[in-house]
Image (tube, helix red, strand yellow):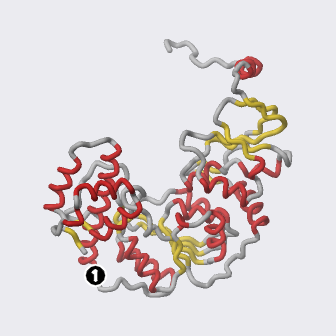
Amino acid sequence: MGGRDTIRPLHPEHVLSRFKSCSDTTQIDGQAIYLGILHNHYGHFLCETLSRLWAIDSVDSHARLVLLVTDAGVPGFVDDFFRMAGLQDRLVYVRTPVCVESLVIPDAAVIYPHLFHPAFLRLTRSVLERTAFLSDNETAPLFVSRGNLVPGYSRYVVGERMLHEAMVRAGATIVSPETLGIAEQIRLFNAHRRIVGYAGSAMHNLLFTTGDKDVLYYSARAIPKIYRLIDKDLRNRARYVDAHLLSCPGMLAFEIGFKPEVLDLPGVVQEISSFLGVELVLEGLDHLAYQKCAVVEFNTASMLRYVVEQRARGSSTLEAEFADLEHSHVFDREMIARSMQRSPVLRKFFGDIGWEKSAHNFSY
């Protein structure tokens, strides 16, 4: 400040001497690759945590792989990936200071969401050589569904459940990625040539395919540039569908973290029908009827998210707020019931207020 330098370089020996004075410092002998922070989010793990691992064949065959672990811990899919890649014995999860004899810091092949370098595909080839997954051996399209995610916790997409049902009727293979291990997800993405899905984390499984796929992404928000960059280097033939439906009258305006996205479902169905060469059918649902359903689904998903967030903050007014809402708005009873089955927080809240005995303003 005040015109003087505030950042001064320290000599490496000085830095090392400070670490060596710590009683909990761990020494890593030999060579190691710095992979950076361990991202607990599936898509960011695939794109960013693994973005330096392209250099694995350029270092010593016994080099350790250094990951910085946050307080969130290590998700199961992380160990599953490194086990699948045959690298689990080389992992070092860093939670306290370490001294590394020789640390290699490769450039990141991915800077999310605007840079993708084809060097990343060296890792892809290494993983596929080891796993030997079959490619394009399934003729049915693969639909990557978000229909089983719990409202109130995940980014909710209004219209996804109805699209899921239409894809089932069209004969697609349906996958709910959150129910599968990472190896099975990647196997399925390799097995199917035609893949349809919301532009979210699961679609980054394409990074570990041979490419040359026909892919359709849809989203009610802007699709990040990274998808296009990855598809270009994988030689995928991809469509990117902007499926945002403008707000409908009656939508609640909760102050919540992730507001539900509302698909222009008739538009998405038309695009997918053209893409697959098969007419998808929304049974008994015209555009106006969908808008009415979308309002109920949007409000229910928003309300569930609001309940989860307010319970975490210890709100003392939540029960009274909900009592007012249920007299003035229609909510989806089936969605609430499904969410209660999978969320202790929602199960306790709705159990405490006795909503199951209430007969007003719920759709069935």
Residue 171 visible within the image: yes
Left or right: 180, with 294 as reference point: right
- Name the spot of residue 146 as percent of width and height, x first: 45, 67
Q: Nearest the camera: 361 or 137?
A: 361
Q: Residue at x 67, y 64 (%)?
A: 208
Q: Residues within 10 Å of mark 1 (few under 14, many from 20)?
A: few
Q: Residue at x 28, y 62 (%)?
A: 300
Q: Quadrant of residue 10?
A: top right
- Name the spot of residue 233 as percent of width and height, x first: 66, 63
Left or right: 63, with 72 as reference point: right
- Residue occupied by mark 1: 286
- Name the spot of residue 321 as percent of width and height, x first: 19, 51
Q: Looking at the picture, does residue 291 appear above or below residue 253?
A: below
Amino acid type for the residue under numbered disc 1: Asp
Q: Quadrant of residue 136?
A: bottom right
State how many labels appear.
1
- Name the spot of residue 192 as percent of width and height, x first: 62, 77
Q: Looking at the picture, does residue 77 appear above or below residue 167?
A: above
Left or right: 219, with 206 as reference point: left
Q: Residue at x 42, y 57 (%)?
A: 154
Q: Residue at x 65, y 31 (%)?
A: 96
Residue 11 visible within the image: no
In the structure shown, which secondary structural element does the residue marked by tag 1 occupy? loop
Q: Quadrant of residue 338?
A: bottom left
Q: Looking at the picture, does residue 276 appear above or below residue 75?
A: below
Q: Looking at the rendering, in which quadrant would you find the C terminus?
A: bottom left
Q: Nearest the camera: 325 or 274?
A: 325
